[in-house]
Structures are given as C-alpha cells and as structure tokens.
Amino acid sequence: MRDSVGLAVFVKTPGMSPIKTRLATSIGQARAEEFYRRSVAAVEDCMTRLKALEMLQPHWAVAEPDALAHPMWSNHTTISQGQGSLGLRLAKVFDALSRRHEIVMAIGGDSPQLSVGTFELAIRHLNGRANCSHVIGRCHDGGFYLVGSNRRVPTIVWNQVTYSEASTADELVQLLSQTGRVGDLGRLSDVDTHTDLSVLVDELQCVESLTSPQQCLLSWLQDVLAC
C-alpha cells in the first residue's frame, strides 16, 4: 500500500557540484556555499517537523550519483536525481516516488522560507477536497519553488517546459492543466542574485514563529547585506 504524501528535496552537494554560481559572482563562492548550507539546514528542520507530524515522507533527491551516502545526506532517505536535463530528472524522481506515494511534491534545498504551513496548504489542494490534480508555488522570477501532483505526470510534460526562464512556471501550469486543475500556493523569492537576498530577508521576517535555523540564516543574511 502506498503512503499518502512523498516529498523530493532536490539538492546538490557542496564540493561536488557548482553551487549558486550566479550568486557567487556577487558575494563570492565561499559565501554562496554558506548560504546554501544554511538554507538546507532550514529545509532539513522543516522536513523533520513534517515527518514528526506524519504529514509526509521526505526524500532527498541528490544530484551526484556518488553522493547518496555523503555525510550531508547520510541521515536522510536519498534518491538519485539521475542524469540529463531538469525535465528528465523531475520525471525520473516523480515517477519513482509515485510508485510509493499517492501524492508527490518537489522543492529545492534552497527554499529556507518554507514552513509547515506551506505544505499543509499544498496537501489540502491535493487531497481531493479542493478538486485539484496539481499544485504549484511560483517564484517572482517566473520559476517555481514547489510543484506537486496526485496523479502521474507524463515525462513529455516535464520535457516540454523551458526551464530557468521567466515563462517556466506559466508553461508548466499550462501543460499540467491539461490533465486537471492546478492549485496556486502564491509567490516567493528564488535566490539567484545579491538583490534576491534582500527579498528573502523580508520573506523570512514575515514567517510566523521562525525556527532556529531560519533565525540563524536571517541573522547571517543581515550581516552579509550590511557589509
């Protein structure tokens, strides 16, 4: 019998893959990697809370095939993203998790402002009561920070999307809507540039009851921006 909700956290391993390369051009590679590690820590804390509440089962979708047992991920259930484009990797992970879970969602490890409430809302969209087949959380730059579905999404859908463009989320919604209603979680920032750090600070300050990792990240960001 399949579990109700599975979540894939798409991550890269510092030291084994380039991390936040656009951000690194403005704040340096060391700080960009530090931002990523702190973001992952905030996401990890949220996943621990969600798992304790038995809301979902997190899976860490690791970019590097040789890093599934890396110390950074060794305490988590891991799955390989596989090779190829983002579309192919999303298709692979969603297909694998849909065999184990009735609802599958995916986020990135660099979305530290997400809270338990974010996933509560996503699950409400997908548990049948809202008559949604899919759900999306859009980024201000046109991408997405969360995507989920309660039905299998064909590989061709993932592959038809143009990623890392201002039209990415719109394209994905248009394709997903052909097989069911798409619920909207609202917009959040996606940190790619120095300017995005200020937006993230504002979003973290709006989070009700910041967790300890979120507060640590917020303080770190304020120090970086003050330099």
Image (cartoon, rainbow, N blue to C red):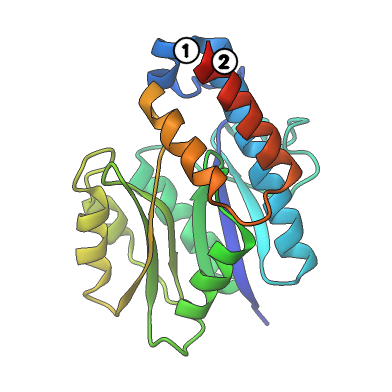
Tell me the kind of residue under disc 1. Ile
- Percent of width and height locating residue 188: 40, 49
Q: Amino acid at mark 2?
A: Arg
Disc 1 to disc 2, how far (Cα)?
6 Å
SS of the residue under disc 2: helix
Question: Is residue 97 placed above or below 160 in the rendered structure?
Answer: below
Residue 211 is situated, as x and y percent measured from the top left of the image, at: 72, 48
Residue 66 visible, this angle: no
Residue toward you, 134 or 205: 205
Relative side of 17 to 191, left or right? right
Q: Quadrant of the N terminus?
A: bottom right
Q: Residues within 10 Å of mark 2 (few under 14, many from 20)?
A: some
Residue at image location 37% in from the left, 47% down from the top: 88
Q: Badge 1 local density, few (<14 within 10 Å), some, or many (20+)? A: some
Which residue has dot 1 on it? 27
Q: Residue at x 42, y 86 (%)?
A: 130
**Which residue is under mark 2?**
31
